[in-house]
Amino acid sequence: MLAAYNQPAKRVAHPGQATLDVVEVYPYVPYVQYLLPGSVVMSIFMMVMIGGGIIFIDDKARGLHEGYLVTPITKFELIAGFNISGTDQGRARRRVL
């Protein structure tokens, strides 16, 4: 294709030869570099979601969640507390097992 393109035309607007340059848009990165950090993050995420979610569901079943509404903390602080306690409990469970 390049040879046909480089042939002189009847009327040359821009003299010169066409060249191709290799441009790496996505350079090669071995996936193994991301395997360990990804596994750790997914492990923490699942621990937090399961641990924190179970705490909230258990509190709601016992009727304790109504007490959260009268506390002087924000919703963000409440969710962060659930997540941190769920992470801590997950870490404690792994030590026991």
Image: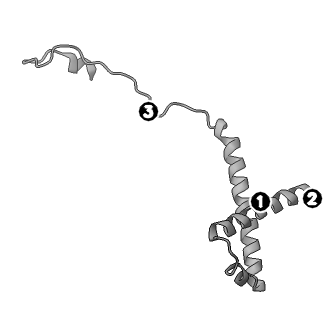
> In front here: 68 or 13?
68
- Residue 72's place in the image compared with 76, above or below, is below
- Give the number of callouts: 3
Q: Decide: few, some or many residues near mark 2? Use Cα within 10 Å; few <14, some 14-19, many ≥20.
A: few
When asked about the image quadrant of residue 12, the answer is top left
CA–CA distance in space, label 2 to label 3: 48 Å
Give the labeled residue for mark 3: 25
Identified by mark 3, the residue type is Val
Residue at the location (50% across, 31% down)? 27
Horizontal side of 17 relative to 22 (left or right) equals left
When asked about the image quadrant of residue 58, the answer is bottom right
Horizontal side of 19 relative to 39 (left or right) equals left
> In front here: 91 or 24?
91
Q: How is the image coloured?
A: one colour
Horizontal side of 20 relative to 94 (left or right) equals left
- The answer to whether marks 3 and 1 mark residues whose Cβ atoms lie closer than 8 Å is no
- Going from N to C along the chain, the mark reached first, 3 or 1, is 3
When asked about the image quadrant of residue 83, the answer is bottom right
Give the labeled residue for mark 2: 96
Closest to the camera, between mark 3 and mark 1, is: 1
Q: Decide: few, some or many residues near mark 3? Use Cα within 10 Å; few <14, some 14-19, many ≥20.
A: few
> In front here: 6 or 37?
37
- Extreme bottom residue here? 63
- Extreme right residue here? 96
Residue at the location (36% across, 21% down)? 21
Q: Position of residue 45 (x, y in %)?
A: 69, 57
Give the labeled residue for mark 1: 87
Label of residue 19 in the image: none
